[in-house]
Amino acid sequence: MYRDILEDSWVYQEILKEGLEKGVNQGLEQGLANGEQRAFLAIIQKRFPDIVPFVRQQISGVTDTNLLESLIAEVSVAQSSQEALEVLSVLKGNGHTNGKQGKAKQVRKYYSNVSRYPRLCGKMSEMW
């Protein structure tokens, strides 16, 4: 009985409406970020498949859609895997990485079994 009265009140209806709007907006933002991540990974997969696992790990927590759009634009014109990885260096400045030592260690570990990129491993460790 009291619940029915409360649910019919204008205050309850306003609070419910605001909560639903916030939830929808959050869901849309998360969905958009997820789509941007997928687009970025699709470009990497098509152009530079050798770095997909590393890139996937690096962008998994990035939810800033503006940043993701910039990354997509930059990686679309990258000429090599090294350039594509250099595009990701902006994540370091935005607090999306583990720091210089952790990043270099990850890159060396990833490329330790890839004999085609011995110079890339050294250059990436210098970057981070």
Image: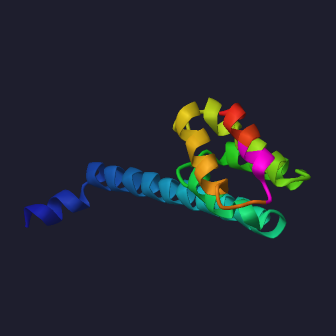
Specify the segment rendered in magenta. Answer: 116-121
Q: Is residue 117 left or right of residue 99?
A: right
> Which quadrant would residue 70 be assigned to in this image?
top right
Magenta stretch: helix, strand or loop mostly: helix
Total numbered labels placed on residues in the image:
0
Residue 108 % position (x, y)? 63, 48
Q: Residue at x 35, y 50 (%)?
A: 14
Q: Is residue 128 left or right of residue 26?
A: right
Residue 128 % position (x, y)? 65, 33
Residue 99 visible in the shown view: no
Q: How is the image coloured?
A: rainbow
67 up-or-down from 6: above or below: above
Residue 1 visible in the shown view: yes
Residue 40 % position (x, y)? 72, 59
Residue 63 % position (x, y)? 57, 49
> Which quadrant would residue 37 be assigned to in this image?
bottom right
Q: Residue at x 40, y 50 (%)?
A: 18
Q: Is residue 36 left or right of residue 43?
A: left
- Check if residue 83 falls in the magenta segment: no
Q: Residue at x 81, y 54 (%)?
A: 81
Q: Residue at x 87, y 53 (%)?
A: 80
| Foreground pick, 13 / 61 | 61
| Foreground pick, 104 / 9 | 104
Quarter in which the N terminus is drawn: bottom left
128 up-or-down from 113: above or below: above
